[in-house]
Image (tube, rainbow, N blue to C red):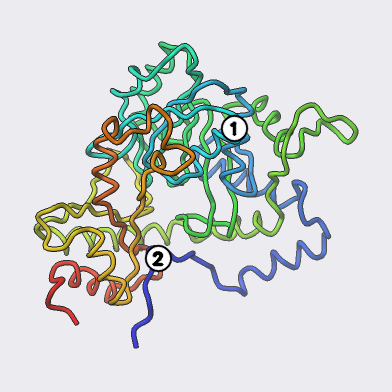
């Protein structure tokens, strides 16, 4: 009997490798509040990701909320409807009005050509997403931001280790937010981080993630409890030892899918965005009318075969009840995002996925009516 295969499974190093870290936590009796592993992990991430400063968080949603608070963002923020709902939830948590604009047909990232027309006197920032780990058009977005004096916060949840034309994509914008959720390329079970451009910004963010404390007896802001525990930080340090090998395996699976699905009518494998280093975070395909099954029918049929893809992102954020009433949420204003959401299907990709299973997924998609 074949086991069920899902879009992603967390990469976990051998348990015996983690035991020395766990013993050190037990011996130190420091479980949280920015202990030794927390500081080591921040330093190791800065070196690996080629960034100047990083602030660890318990998860990326809290990190997004804090990033907006740290830059004192209010009013309206221009963002994409094609993302996980945490992107815009972070805006509502801060009392900010999301303004949706359409996405690029090739990358499915926010379309810079649509941003400028959406700017109003109330606009204070742009919140783009490096979708599937493919970089946004960072130069075009920054040019718009500079022209209109706007802040840019990147939701880089998918973009761990990704490099664009000038190095780490995480160094673009005023802040970038990473996710270390269990489903991500690099995980600490739960976790996240904010990439900070300077020590002063990091110091403010570190205060905000610790209830606004500035020293033992002084509270200077309405912060939150967003600290990463020593357990999660220790796991992150261990994961860093394995990440390069994991990326090699992901690249092999990505290449196999592209080779096997090439020429299948109605199936388009999403390309990259010209990045110089990829992380192969997801493997999205688009299922268009030339394919013999509709996207939802293919999704359902694969599940009967023990393969569980994901319609990621469907529905659009703009179609959820708390957002659909916004003037910018109408489908007619978001034709590219609406079409992509109706055609997208992410296939399984993770380091422990064996090539025999990859070949089976390819065969099921290439010949959907001949497999039992």
What number is the disc on residue 50? none
**Relative to 97, residue 184 above or below:** below
x%, y% of residue 337?
29, 39
83 or 27, which is in the foreground?
83
256 or 105, which is in the foreground?
105
Circle 1 — which element?
A: helix
Circle 2 — which element?
A: loop
Nearer the N terminus, badge 2 or badge 1?
1
x%, y% of residue 265?
9, 58
* Quadrant (top left, top right, bottom left, bottom right) of the N terminus: bottom left
**Relative to 173, residue 309 above or below:** below
Residue located at (13% from left, 71% from top): 367
x%, y% of residue 36?
74, 50
Compared across the picture, whether 175 is left or right of 210 comes to left
Which residue extends farthest bottom? 1
Residue located at (56% from left, 73% from top): 14
**Relative to 352, residue 53 above or below:** above
Front of the two marks 2 and 1: 1
> What is the spatial separation of the Cα atoms under label 2 and label 1, in whole angstroms?
31 Å
Tag 2 residue? 351
What number is the disc on residue 67? 1
Question: Based on the displayed image, in which of its 4 quarters is residue 68 positioned?
Answer: top right
* Quadrant (top left, top right, bottom left, bottom right) of the C terminus: bottom left
């Amino acid at each position: 009997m074949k086991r069920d295969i899902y879009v992603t499974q967390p990469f976990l190093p051998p348990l015996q490798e983690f035991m020395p870290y766990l013993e050190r936590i037990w011996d130190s009796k420091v479980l949280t509040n920015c202990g030794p592993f927390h500081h080591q992990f921040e330093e190791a991430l800065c070196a690996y990701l080629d960034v100047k400063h990083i602030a660890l968080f318990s998860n990326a949603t809290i990190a997004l909320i804090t990033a907006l608070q740290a830059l004192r963002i209010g009013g309206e923020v221009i963002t994409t409807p094609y993302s996980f709902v945490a992107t815009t939830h972070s805006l509502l948590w801060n009392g900010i009005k999301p303004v949706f604009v359409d996405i690029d047909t090739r990358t499915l990232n926010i379309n810079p050509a649509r941003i400028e027309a959406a700017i109003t006197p109330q606009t204070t920032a742009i919140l783009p997403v490096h979708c599937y780990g493919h970089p946004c058009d960072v130069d075009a977005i920054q040019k718009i931001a500079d022209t209109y004096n706007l802040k840019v916060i990147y939701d880089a949840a998918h973009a761990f280790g990704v490099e664009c034309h000038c190095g780490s994509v995480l160094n673009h914008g005023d802040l970038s937010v990473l996710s270390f959720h269990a489903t991500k390329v690099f995980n600490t079970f739960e976790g996240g981080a904010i990439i900070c451009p300077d020590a002063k910004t990091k110091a403010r963010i570190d205060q905000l993630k610790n209830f606004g404390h500035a020293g033992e007896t002084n509270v200077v802001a309405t912060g939150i409890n967003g600290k990463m525990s020593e357990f999660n930080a220790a796991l992150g340090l261990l994961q860093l030892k394995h990440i390069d090998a994991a990326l090699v395996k992901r690249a092999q699976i990505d290449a196999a899918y592209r080779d096997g699905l090439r020429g299948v009518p109605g199936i388009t494998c999403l390309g990259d965005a010209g990045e110089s280093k990829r992380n192969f975070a997801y493997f999205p395909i688009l299922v268009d009318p030339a394919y013999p099954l509709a996207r939802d029918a293919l999704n359902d049929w694969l599940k009967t075969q023990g393969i569980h893809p994901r319609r990621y992102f469907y529905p659009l954020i703009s179609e959820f009840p708390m957002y659909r009433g916004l003037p910018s949420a109408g489908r007619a204003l978001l034709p590219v995002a609406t079409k992509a959401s109706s055609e997208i299907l992410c296939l399984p990709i993770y380091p422990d996925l064996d090539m025999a299973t990859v070949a089976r997924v390819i065969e099921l998609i290439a010949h959907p009516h001949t497999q039992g």
